[in-house]
Amino acid sequence: MNTASTHAAEHHGEYHPGGLRRWLTTTNHKDIGTMYLTFSLIMFFVGGLMILAVRAELFQPGLQLMKPEFFNQLIGVHALVMIFAALMPAATGFANWMIPLMIGAPDMALPRLNNWGFWLLPPAAILLTLPFTLALFGIGDGAIATGWTFYAPLSVQGGMGVDFAILAVHILGISSIMGSINIIVTIFNMRAPGMTMMKLPLFAWGWLITAFLLIATLPVLAGAVTMLLTDRHFGTHFFDAAGGGDPILFQHLFWFFGHPEVYILLLPVWGLMPHVLATFSRKPTYGYTAQVYSFIAIGILSVVVWAHHFFTAGMPVPALIYFMFSTMAISLPLAVLFFCWIATMWKGAMTFETPMLFAVGFIVLFGIAGLTGLILADVAADAQYHHSYFVVAHFHYALFAGGIMGVMTGVYYWLPKWTGHMYNETLGKLHFWLTVVSFNLTFIPQFFLGLAGMPRRIPDYALQFAEFNAISTVGAFILGLSQLLFAWNIWSCIRGGPKVENRVWEGADGLEWELSSPPPHHSWDTQPQVK
Amino acid sequence: MQTAQPAFSAADLARRRSASRRLAWLLAAIVLAIYLVGLFIKR
């Protein structure tokens, strides 16, 4: 720890409340980042347990463990929990922890808003999962059973769980918007002198585009689910064809949010990858400017391609062609990112510590998501593959391999900086290999199931799909259990372990590595000067 | 990459936070506008 940082930590340390009060009232970006990440990890296991119950049901054909209604609820809430309560808070946790450190800011620009943004999350998570508990006591008919998409008219006719989910999504949306506003204003106004926008770390760039996407699209989702609420309880007919409404309108509104949401989940990870790849390749990031413009291009394109999610719902041929080609156009800036990532590693002095393993695994597996996405973007091919397990496999390659493995990359990369201790490298590598092998064991069979015609969201299936489903379930349970290694490694690292230097990794570059490990409670009391 | 300099002065920090609050309210107004426009969408 350098002298100035030590002094700052000691000087401010005496004013901090302890215990629960510290966490309830904190406005410190590192405390709030820790709370986001802890919440995310807990909800990751909650969402994971739900889907393990689903996979257990699908282990064999026939109904084994649960009624179809409960099966539908588990699938919908799994998706909502994983997207809104696990992945998004993880990315926000990273942003809270790292953006002020990376840009030389003493804290987020609006610390109280930051605290409020986090503390909206737990009530929303309770709202999402409470209907399961209420149903046990005979109250209501369980959680939302429409899938995460809330498609009308099913959601107009659904039970009380839909209302809980609508309210939860409103609260989660407000929380995300608060976080996004804070991140935008922090990046614009709190950068250290000399940190121009084109010197901004790529992680901050990725989050900046993410934050603008959230601000542009979350109000549309909020508007859509508010209209759904009024259709359900106040006699409107926005989405009710019998009353002159249009259920397809809901699909347009939902996916105007839903497709950018994919990039909202992925852009922070894409911003993180160049840091990790450059660190463990011991080379500067290749193509910084190209990556920045690719982020911007992907951000813009992501809001004009939404209807590829429902090609088969019916739309004019020119619209089909437009949405097909605009969707495929996203592969161009994405390909630029892939080439930059690979070029960063090219001829580098590479070593394969756990974060690098996860980063390379991310590139390979997320590449599969991109390639299968191109197949689904084709209108003709999509007519066959939509609503099949091919889609399920595709988006898990995008959101697990691309999103969650990206988050794991970030955790292993920054955990020593956050805690001051090195995690168990052997356990980290074991976690990586178990995760990669079991992930593929789970989802490669689902590609074949989809190609063979197995529809998604069904608790029972024809005998011909039995073998692949059994393999997928075995893979899912290994995948789930191997995540306990991740949790244990984090816990052990927080509790202790070998001390690390300020610059944890030999090849790491950036302001964040100038601070002590762990950083002092008040970051950058001594202002950095970026050259 | 960096050399130690005096910390953000109180005045500088106040100016930055004030600019942040103004931009935050503008962004919040945009969010509210998008939300309200959504409620008036007709098929």
Image (cartoon, helix red, strand yellow):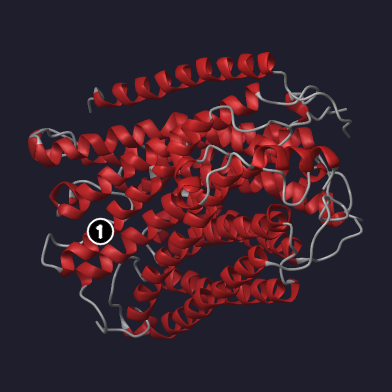
Between A480 and A120, the one lying in front of the other is A120
In this picture, is A285 found above or below A212? below
Residue at image point 37% right, 54% down: A80
Name the amino acid type tagged 1: Leu
Image quarter hosting the C terminus of chain A = top right
- Answer yes or no: is residue B35 visible: yes
* Residue A348 % position (x, y): 90, 55
Estimate the x, y position of residue A202 in percent, counting from the top left.
71, 39
Q: Position of residue A105 (x, y in %)?
A: 69, 30
Task: Please give left or right for residue A410 compared with residue A464 in the image.
Answer: right
A374 relative to A43, above or below: above
**Residue A445 in the figure: left or right of residue A386:** right
Residue at the image position 83 percent from the left and 27 percent from the top: A529
Q: Quadrant of residue A76?
A: bottom left
Chain letter of the residue beneath label 1 in the structure image: A
What residue is drawn where x is 64% and y is 23%? A188
* Front-lying residue, A96 or A248: A96
Image: A56 above or below A320: below
Give the image quarter of residue A512: top right
Q: Residues within 10 Å of mark 1 (few under 14, many from 20)?
A: some
Does the rendering let one see residue A371? no
Q: Secondary structure at mark 1?
A: helix
Residue to which mark 1 is pinned: A130
